[in-house]
Image: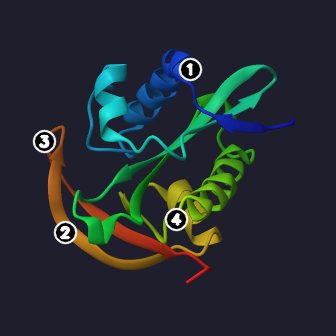
Amino acid sequence: MDIIIRAMKADDWNAVQHIYLEGIATGNATFQTSAPAWSDWDKGHLSICRLVAEADGEIVGWAALSPVSSRCVYRGVAEVSIYVSDKRRGVGVGAALMGELIKTSEKEGIWTLQSGVFPENRRSLALQRKYDFREVGCRKRLGQLNGVWRDVLLLERRSSKL
């Protein structure tokens, strides 16, 4: 299977939203319980480094960055989101997205990528560790998802260009 990574366009939203909903349904990807409208998602993510993965003419994954703060000192720090279609997990889509996201983010001046991951999300943890993210802590009982308190592992990756 050939995976093509390209910039996300607004008209990719239906496919991106569907994949996001598949991730939400796992119960281990996010505290979100529904996918937002395009306009809300668009406002919450950086305009740079929005990627989709295509295989066999279909969008099978996406990646994007969110700002962690509006303060200028954090302009080079962003939170990673990567989601892969149920049908294509475990075949390299996430790795292709992560590799391109790192390369693109560094070109755009991002020096730290960070993420918050449920400990149960083993695939996400393995992917991030493969790309030199390091665990910096665990926020115990950070929030509730469907009435259950969840821990969140904090991971970060510093640019090799520092």
For the residues labelled 4 and 3, the Cα–Cα distance comes to 39 Å
Q: Nearer the viewer, residue 63 or 23?
A: 63
Amino acid at the residue labelled 2: Lys
**With 139 as the anchor, is 3 left or right in this view?**
right
* Residue position for label 4: 109
- Identity of the residue drawn at 40% across and 45% down: 29
Q: Secondary structure at mark 1?
A: helix
Q: Nearer the viewer, mark 4 or mark 2?
A: 4
Instruction: Note whether 71 is above or below 85 in the view shown.
Output: below
Q: Which mark is residue 147?
A: 3
The residue beneath circle 2 is 140
* Of labels 2 and 3, the one closer to you: 2
- Give the side of residue 157 with respect to residue 138, left or right: right
Q: Residue at x 51, y 26 (%)?
A: 16
Q: Amino acid at mark 3?
A: Gly
Q: CA distance from mark 2 to mark 3?
A: 15 Å
Mark 4 vs mark 3: give the one in front: 4
